[in-house]
Image (tube, rainbow, N blue to C red):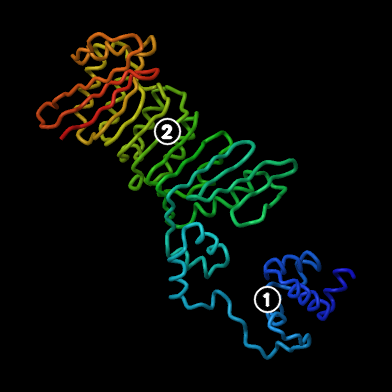
Amino acid sequence: MSPDFIKENHLYLKTCILYEVLQKKPIFDSYRNFCNTVGKDAMDYPNFEFWYYRFYHGCRDFDYDRSADPEPKTLVDIPVVLMNKIAEYLDPVERTYLRSMNHALKTVVDYFPPVFEKIEISISDTNLRWNLNNQSFSCFKKEGGCTLYRPNFPVEKSEMCHIQKGLKHLAPLLKIPNVQVNLLSLNLFEQIPDRDDLLPVPFNAKRVLFWSQDMNKVLQYLSGMNPGHLESISLDGLISDELENHRILFETDQFKQAKRAEFKYYWGFNVEDLASFSHLHRLKCQVRIDNTFEDVPRIRDILSTFEELESCELELMGRLGRVPMRELADALGEDTGPLAEGEHLTIIHRYRIPDSNDSLEFKINNGGSRCRLEIHRIR
């Protein structure tokens, strides 16, 4: 019997529903099988649910007239106070699902600005991945389109480009009014869209971690962060050491108002650049030096003027590569004593800040491929 023939006869449709009831399957599985058999347009879920449970409870009257039944209640008929209470107990990811159902629910959900612990986004020419707190989503490029994976949803195949398909689900979430996140992590590959296509401006992130080899991309996305909300900036992957890029970065309100900054594996800074970090509480970066005996005391003198500084970690590299441990110690007036070949040593140097009761404690470690200075303010 063809599906079209079944759809034209309500008795045949109800016979199919009764068959699903007798199989003792969960109602959602039964409805999915029903749609696969007779078509998704044969009956909507509320009607299917009514007949399913009527048959389940033993009422087998196929000719029952529903015209006298009261109009069924829907989710939006729940009192607003109760809907607010429900939305309050949902996590941010669950609220985004609820928000997408209809306009009335969207209004309720938007009353509770979502606060995510972390949002991680990575876009490449083969996939788009994003994590919302501990839930992972991905869209992979496939021949003729893409495949979308979402928690608690069936795998979805599409003819769309993987980036377009992924952003169709991701971008609206990021543009929920007043969305906040403690950590925003972006891999800024060439394929990432323009900032305004992905994020609202300003975007409320407390910490950002950007991986990119393109300083222009970094500046574009960094400028979209809310300066009054952003506290920590971490940049990774940068390869350009152009002074003009440094100047533009240092002049952004986002950098000027940040409390912490970290630059991973970036060797574009020299001693003079340290002065631009004077407002920071914590700093981690790499610094090139030309003359150990001149530059290391200069670093100490510059850091001693940072009134907000709590801690700092610097990796130093000289013209010939790694700065010898003995040179660093001598530059700070510390004696290393005799060192056996391959021996690791940690030297502590304390410097009293002029006109202050505070001191800077320098811990010099010669382990690893480069010398590292760990500096802490002692109050």
* Residue 158: mark in rendering: none
- Residue at position x 46%, y 67% in the image: 87
Residue 373 sits above or below residue 59 on the image: above
Residue type of the residue flagged with mark 2:
Leu
Mark 1 Cα-neighbour bin, 10 Å: few <14, some 14–19, many ≥20:
some
Residue found 9% across the figure and 29% down from its top: 355
Please say if 236 is above or below 59.
Answer: above
- Classify residue 122 by image quadrant: top right
Q: In this view, does 340 lie to the left or right of 8?
A: left
Residue type at the position of mark 1: Glu
Residue, disc 2: 235
Q: Which mark is in front, 1 or 2?
A: 1
The vertical placement of 330 against 111, above or below, is above
Q: How far apart are marks 1 and 2 (CA)?
A: 53 Å
In terms of image quadrants, where is residue 224? top left
- Label 2: few (<14), some (14–19) or many (≥20) C-alpha neighbours in 10 Å: many
In-image side of 83 versus 271 (left or right): right
Measuring from the top left, give residue 255's x and y in whole percent: 34, 37
In this view, the residue in front, 374 or 356, is 374
